[in-house]
Amino acid sequence: MTPASAARPLVSVEDLTVRFDTGERVVHAVNGVGLTLAEGETLGILGESGSGKSVTLRCLMRLLPPRRARIGGRILFAGEDVLAMDERRLADHRGRSVAMIFQEPMLAFDPVFTIGEQIAETVRRHEGLDRAAARRRALEMLERVRIPGAARRLDAYPHEMSGGMRQRAMIALALSCRPRLLLADEPTTALDATVQIQILLLLRELQAELGMAVIFVTHDIGVAVETSDRIAVMYAGRIVESGTARDVVRTPRHPYTAGLLASRAEGAPRGTRLGAIPGAPPDLAHIPTGCAFAPRCAVAGPECGEAVPAARDLGGGHQASCLRV
Amino acid sequence: MSATPLLRVSGLRKFFPVRGGLLGRKVADVQAVDGVSFEVARGETLGIVGESGCGKSTTARLLIRLIEPDAGEIVFDGFGLGDGMTLAELRRQAQMVFQDSYASLNPRLTVADTIAFGPRVHGMPAAQAMTLARDLLRKVGLDPALFAGRYPHELSGGQRQRVNIARALALSPRLLILDEAVSALDKSVEAQVLNLLCDLKAELGLTYLFISHDLNVVRFMSDRVMVMYLGKVVEIGDVETLYADPRHPYTAALLSAMPSMDPDRRTAEAPLAGDPPNPIDPPSGCRFHTRCPFAEDPCRRAEPGLKPAGDRRLVACHMNDPASGHSRAGRQGEAA
Ligand SMILES: Nc1ncnc2c1ncn2[C@@H]1O[C@H](COP(=O)(O)OP(=O)(O)OP(=O)(O)O)[C@@H](O)[C@H]1O
Ligand SMILES: Nc1ncnc2c1ncn2[C@@H]1O[C@H](COP(=O)(O)OP(=O)(O)OP(=O)(O)O)[C@@H](O)[C@H]1O
Ligand code: SF4
Ligand SMILES: [Mg+2]
Ligand SMILES: [Mg+2]
């Protein structure tokens, strides 16, 4: 999208679609997502529950259940077709090139092994280091994520740590093989406010230090602003607007983004009414034809229901998929 | 606050036993709520904020006696519980709406039956209760012709939460306790429900206790705000003055931990290090002293009381008490 990322994107996703066939209904979770990401860049994906953020991320690591999920489109990572990778290539892709952190750190850890064992094992598997070197790397990683008393914590089990500490340990695990891309799926949503900001700043620092690219999924505009160079806004499985964090937050052009920003309680004087968006997001088994936001949109016309609006270029890498811009 | 407050709570305490070992003997206590006192005026909204586990929900549950307090007094509209007011009466006058809109609705009852249930139990004839239910549905913005006969699974999260609000209103309460009532809603739906709550309050003259971890939403909704940390109240004050000039170091840290909305002014430094301590074995003296940038000897030794700090504010910090021996006592302006 930006000239730099057009030159040599680390990730390029084209017309990604994901359907889940549950037998009785087909859920249209992702409906034509396109995005590019340059080396070292942070993209925030912002969207409400069910908008397809996690499914999009999981596609980049091919983590979806193959029998139930039908994936279409193309995903290139450093020029390589991710959807065409065989199991062996995938095992290398996951963990070494791309790593992921989640909202619930217990998902990333096996409860019966210590934190140190698990990080060391990952490093040995992907980089072939010997035992001692792998343990040294594990210690170095725990220090890097600023776990106090890191040497002692190497031998701790996941359940022996507090929530914030576990989150740090999961980040250490994810970064232990120095991935070129980190996928972060709401890693701070379950944390206390004073711990969340610590983790956000830590991620920002590590990203600058290690030069990796990051895709950060969140439903919180503030979290996206704190972490991201660019923001992509998702609605009903599509990216409806994308651009620099500044452009998206200050001059939102898609009616959904604009509505979302206008409905925030932040800064709204008490006793006034919030500019709420009417209605609710669509059922993904029955997405409206055309623009999925049209039934809730204040400026929609009959033409909005005809075809899915293409992304329109607004300059400076700012795009919005709306007939009215 | 000279008029009788609608709600006065003093010295509320609840410790949950932690059991362990083969015999399940009590080995420790979670000090969930410890000496909480506050007042809510008629028609006011008191916001309650603080991090996970600080005792917000426990406080709310104690108020309507979903759990029994170990100690403390609750006076509703001038009448003490068991002293002019029965538990049944308190539970009619004070209703609660929870975060989880699905779990709090009976899946086998239609929306209208759910709303009519309370009034029926209190002796209202069926036909009248149904009319009331349909009126309330309209009031919360759901067309009774479309929604009265639906079941909870046929509703969206925002619609379910509207039903929960209608149900809470069915017994004409005077106090509504909203415990993370909008937290599970989509952002684009949250504003609808906040607007609804504001409208209902004005129309019905309600008093709200508004619990949320979203400090922006609390600021928008509340007249006054109470800040809790590890089972204690650390600060109470008018919303605007408290947000503009927090006096307790924890309040200041909590407010500056809010993510920035301005890409050109991102947060540069985390206001606090570390996680909140374990409520099973809270720190001595001031419970915040392990994370407080201003902690001194007196903070480790003695617990600061909740004391007036000007502009209708109460603060529990030794820096607010000239007799505490804290070197900054009486120089609050510089601390925050
Ligand atoms: N394995 C699956 N089988 C069937 N449906 C699924 C599966 N995984 C996700 N979905 C559906 O796909 C849609 C998109 O889900 P996704 O998890 O990407 O949402 P999200 O944007 O991450 O939301 P949240 O903020 O709640 O995490 C949802 O309707 C979800 O129910
Ligand atoms: N029934 C119970 N038994 C044992 N401990 C409990 C019980 N209910 C709450 N606690 C504990 O009491 C403390 C206060 O919990 P409470 O639910 O009041 O916190 P909260 O402020 O509402 O947090 P959150 O923001 O996560 O909802 C916590 O440490 C919690 O684990
Ligand atoms: S009493 Fe001491 S430790 Fe507690 S908040 Fe005040 S200065 Fe900090
Ligand atoms: Mg998700
Ligand atoms: Mg709670």
Image: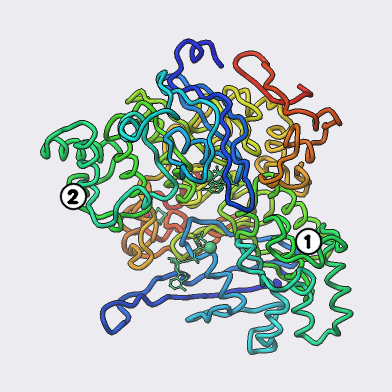
| Residue B116 shows up from this direction | yes
Question: Could you tell me the amino acid type at mark 2?
Answer: Arg
Chain containing mark 1: B
| x and y percentages locating residue A233 in the rendered image | 61, 32
| x and y percentages locating residue B151 in the rendered image | 73, 66
Alpha-carbon neighbours of circle 2 within 10 Å: few (<14), some, or many (≥20)?
A: few
Give me the residue at 51% from left, 21% from top. Answer: A36
Alpha-carbon neighbours of circle 1 within 10 Å: few (<14), some, or many (≥20)?
A: some
User: Is residue B307 toward the left or the right of residue B82 in the image?
Assistant: left
| Label 2 beta carbon within 8 A of ligand 2 | no
Question: To which quarter of the image does residue A244 belong?
Answer: top right
Instruction: Between residue B66 and residue A210, name the one nearer to us.
Output: A210
Instruction: Between residue A98 and residue B297, name the one nearer to us.
Output: A98
Look at the numbered disc 2 and give the secondary structure of its residue.
Answer: helix
Give me the residue at 36% from left, 74% from top. Answer: B29
Q: CA distance from mark 1 to mark 2?
A: 54 Å
Residue under label 1: B201
Check if mark 1's residue and mark 2's residue have beta carbons within 8 Å.
no
What is the tally of numbered marks visible in this picture?
2
Question: Could you tell me the amino acid type at mark 1?
Answer: Lys
| x and y percentages locating residue A19 in the rendered image | 58, 40
Q: How is the image coloured?
A: rainbow
Quarter in which the C terminus of chain A is drawn: top right
Question: To which quarter of the image does residue B193 belong?
Answer: bottom right
Quarter in which the N terminus of chain A is drawn: top right
Residue under label 2: A152
